[in-house]
Image (cartoon, helix red, strand yellow):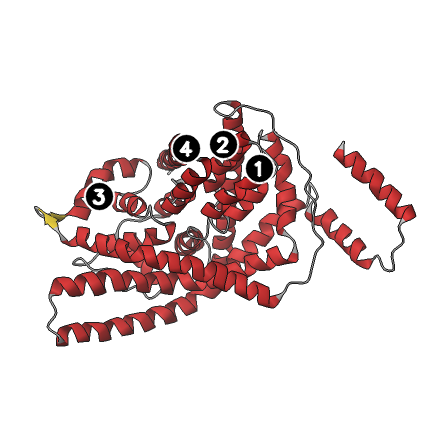
């Protein structure tokens, strides 16, 4: 009905409205015919996402290495100060080997990918392309029994899942709003993108020749994003047929005109509002996480540390889903924010209770392989990172927005269960085939 009204309005406007110039209108129409087509819209969406990841992966290695060298040079100077002051070894361990090394890792490894990814993503947003993504996905959400505006809230989740939860306020129906909140976590946020990009660069890119490794790794991350979107649709459909039955509401999505990007706006939004915001949050949570993890790794119970004891107890279950006990512990301790999962994991794979100095992705890959990682392990880590429980900030926001502990628990249990089942199936199938 709405479509017919728009077509009729367009027919009337063509004969009653005069324009001095219709070049912009014709350009917008041609671009929309390309970007929102049933046949070309989805491939273009996937290709653009893959290109953004490729630019991020190809451009982040050198600045990461430079920052790591700088921070660990500073660490040596700080260590000399502690030695000069005859500070206790435990104090040096907590503050330098625990907290400072975690902060150094967070900044040196996470800052370059974010500083590249966010401007690229903001550029697409400023050009007016992201509303076209929501338009393409609107049809699928309607078929899944959810509200079309969920496509908009999901797009917001790419920046931050907590922000995506808040964006669900635009959905009037309480039932459909809950569906959007529960499933927003399946879209990887800023905190998970660095993890996905780095692990894909190390392991997935190694499957092909070095010439195409960055390109292959980037499109694999884009493929993971597509998996997240498909699971969002599947879970939305399941909820709409079971716990949250109902008929999806209708709404009209008006597409804004394409516009020239504003460089100042892109720089401010991507670097200040997003990169600095996410990095500062990661640093804040990395301080207590680095402290707690170092303590757990250096206080022994019998002949092993508390961290190793917990990890060994989790290891049998973790092996069933293609992980190990330390990986699972990293995800558990990383509940405050997804940004610190890898720093915690690296601190868990320690040498004499201290995080190893990692100056490149190659060093990180060597550390992981030395601890038994294979391509299957990396795949399961990425899948678990994509699908597992929301971070603490997202859960807190969920509770505040829906006002229900019950639905907050549902939003925790559903993705965690799906993550475990998915990794279990992938691991068992891989063992059967290989």
Mark toward the start of the polypeptide (4 vs 3)? 3
Whichever of callouts 3 and 2 sits on the residue coming sooner in the sequence is: 2
Secondary structure under the numbered disc 3 in the rendered image:
helix
**How far separated are the C-alphas under marks 2 and 4?**
20 Å
Q: Is residue 228 above or below residue 360?
A: above
Q: Position of residue 431 (x, y in %)?
A: 35, 36
Q: Label 3 to label 2, Cα distance in Å?
A: 31 Å
Spatial CA span between label 1 and label 4: 18 Å
Q: Which residue is mark 2?
A: 235
Looking at the image, which residue is at 31% across and 65% down?
104
- Indicate which label's residue lies in the foreground, 3 or 2: 2
Q: Contact (CB < 8 A) between labels 1 and 4?
A: no
Q: Quadrant of the C terminus?
A: top left
In terms of secondary structure, where does tag 4 sit?
loop
Q: Quadrant of residue 321?
A: top left
- Residue that label 1 marks: 171
Position of residue 43 in the picture relative to residue 209 (left or right): right
User: Alpha carbon of mark 1 to alpha carbon of mark 2: how far?
Assistant: 18 Å
């Amino acid at each position: 009905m709405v479509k017919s009204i728009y077509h009729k309005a367009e027919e009337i406007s063509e004969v009653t409205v005069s324009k001095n110039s219709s070049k912009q209108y014709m350009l917008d129409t041609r671009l929309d015919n390309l970007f929102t087509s049933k046949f070309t819209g989805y491939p273009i969406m996937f290709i653009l996402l893959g290109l953004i990841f490729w630019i991020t992966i190809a451009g982040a290695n050198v600045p990461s290495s430079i920052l790591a060298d700088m921070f660990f040079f500073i660490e040596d100077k700080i260590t000399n100060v502690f030695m000069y002051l005859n500070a206790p070894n435990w104090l040096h361990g907590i503050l330098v080997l625990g907290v400072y090394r975690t902060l150094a890792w967070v900044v040196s490894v996470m800052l370059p990918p974010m500083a590249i990814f966010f401007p690229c993503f903001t550029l697409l947003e400023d050009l007016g392309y992201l509303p076209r993504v929501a338009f393409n996905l609107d049809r699928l959400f309607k078929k899944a029994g959810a509200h079309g505006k969920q496509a908009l809230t999901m797009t917001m989740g790419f920046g931050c899942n907590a922000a995506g939860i808040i964006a669900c306020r635009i959905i009037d129906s309480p039932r459909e709003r809950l569906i959007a909140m529960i499933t927003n976590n399946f879209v990887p946020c800023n905190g998970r993108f660095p993890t996905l990009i780095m692990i894909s660069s190390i392991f997935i890119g190694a499957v092909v020749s070095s010439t195409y490794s960055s390109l292959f790794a980037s499109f694999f991350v884009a493929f993971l994003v597509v998996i997240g979107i498909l699971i969002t649709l599947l879970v939305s459909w399941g909820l709409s047929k079971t716990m949250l039955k109902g008929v999806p509401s209708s709404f009209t999505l008006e597409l804004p005109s394409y516009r020239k990007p504003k460089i100042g706006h892109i720089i401010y939004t991507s670097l200040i509002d997003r990169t600095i915001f996410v990095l500062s949050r990661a640093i804040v949570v990395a301080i207590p996480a680095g402290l707690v993890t170092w303590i757990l790794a250096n206080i022994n119970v019998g002949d092993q540390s508390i961290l190793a004891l917990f990890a060994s107890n989790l290891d049998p279950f973790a092996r069933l889903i293609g992980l190990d006990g330390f990986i699972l512990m990293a995800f558990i301790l990383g509940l405050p924010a997804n940004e610190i999962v890898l720093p915690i994991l690296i601190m868990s794979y320690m040498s004499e209770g201290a995080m190893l100095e990692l100056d490149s992705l190659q060093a990180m890959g060597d550390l992981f392989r030395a601890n038994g990682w294979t391509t299957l392990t990396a795949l399961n880590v990425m899948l678990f990172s994509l699908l597992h429980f929301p971070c603490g900030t997202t859960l807190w926001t969920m509770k505040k927005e829906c006002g229900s502990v019950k639905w907050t628990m549902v939003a925790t249990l559903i993705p965690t269960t799906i993550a475990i089942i998915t990794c279990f199936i992938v691991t068992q199938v891989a063992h059967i085939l290989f």
